[in-house]
Image: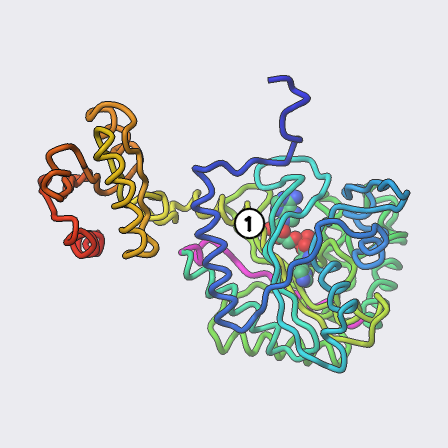
Amino acid sequence: MSKSLQAIRGMNDILPEQTPLWRYFEGAVANLLDGYGYRQIRMPIVEVTELFKRSIGEVTDIVEKEMYTFADRNGDSLTLRPEGTASCVRAVLEHGIAGGGQVQKLWYIGPMFRYERPQKGRYRQFHQIGVEVFNLDGPDIDAELILLTWRLWGLLGIRDAVKLELNSLGTSAARANYRAALVQYLSARLELLDEDSKRRLASNPLRILDSKVPETQALLADAPKMADYLDEESRIHFDGLKARLDAAGIPYVLNPKLVRGLDYYSKTVFEWVTDQLGAQGTVCAGGRYDGLVEQMGGKPTAGVGFAMGIERLILLLETLGQVPAEIARQVDLYLCAFGEPAELAGLALAERLRDQLPGLRLQVNAGAGSFKSQLKKADKSGALFALVLGEDELAQQVIGFKPLRGQGEQQNIAWDALPEHLVACLKQV
Ligand code: HAM
């Protein structure tokens, strides 16, 4: 195939072999969120560029170098969304659904786009499930978000492989004080800083804290600590969150250098990280953004949320062997019919079975090929049982019921008795 017609680098097809695991994962999260009373919202994939610049921050990696931005035919600057929080805040404001202190607990799912260097666990089109809560300012809701993700890791069987890192960035006033102290400290040691950090010192000094350069990290060992600059309000909030996590028995690690790559956070920030996926180990991340709604033109409104990377969690499930066996099987029954009269009767019988047993996964391949080749296909389909309908069976109004996975011998079952027989057999697997 000509290279120009291949998928764009970092944007992947999700093939039929993989979609059952995706659907299992997405279904598990949707059920869990339903159980906590969160409601789904669906936002457009494209927004005006200004939205992301104003919310995520002009001097962030995302806005500076990772957005897919283009002019539409009107000349308006549009951007493929790099994340969901900005769009969600825009939607909530536009429709007035969090006005007057109205609590909203929302979630969304879908593709996000960032022009990053693709590698394992990092793509240019990736998928997130995100949660955003408006108008709840206490640490109890921060705790609920963490509790529900902890429950999800339990349901998926990956709890032992993820670790919670936690920090508080304080209110914007507290952060401004800390920023000034950090800049003063680092400015006095400018010659020891790496080039990237020097650049950030003027634009976004807090991001220096998560620099990967060892010399910069060594320099930071004696730098002012964010925890010492937290104001009373933020400290009480953070203590409240920690107390709730302790009470619920959720382990966490305090990471004073956790700053996140988006500018809208205040107070709580957290990341769930794993060491099982190499460099791209953050599977879920978020925090509080109490100033964002106001910054986007709304009334002061508390906000807190997170987003998880679906690709990374799918990779983690595969790496840990936590893919439930039954999700790979997409067919219960495979109907083979031989000769036109049997084929016609088979089709009608299959429809009747679908009426009687909603949810039955039945594949029909009537009339295509010899007895042997049809049974081969039945076996390959992964079905548990084949239904065999030929001239003899048709004459007797029975069907050959053939277990394909070594669960006994083939037997003839009367058409009328088939639903009951099927239910009993499927229950046993
Ligand atoms: P984020 O940390 O940029 O936060 O992304 C959240 C998660 O999306 C990451 O932890 C990771 O699992 C996944 N992710 C990010 N970039 C990629 C990529 N290039 N390839 C694969 N997966 C990726 C946000 O997006 C915030 N909106 C989260 C939030 C919601 N904060 C408050 N509410």
Secondary structure found at label 1: helix
Amino acid carrying label 1: it is Ile
66 to the left or right of 338? right
153 to the left or right of 113? left
Please provide percent x and percent y for residue 178.
82, 66
Pick whichever, 193 or 307, lies toward us.
Answer: 307
Please provide percent x and percent y for residue 63.
81, 48
Pick whichever, 393 or 10, lies toward us.
Answer: 393
Residue 91 shows up from this direction: yes
- The residue pinned by badge 1 equals 310
156 drawn magenta: no
The answer to which quarter of the image holds residue 350 is top left
Residue at 56% across, 53% down: 273
Q: Is mark 1 within 8 Å of ligand 1?
A: yes
Query: Compared to 322, does 179 lie above or below?
Result: below
101 to the left or right of 273? right
Residue at 50% across, 60% down: 29
Q: Magenta stretch: give its range.
A: 157-171
Residue at 20% across, 24% down: 372
The answer to which quarter of the image holds residue 403 is top left
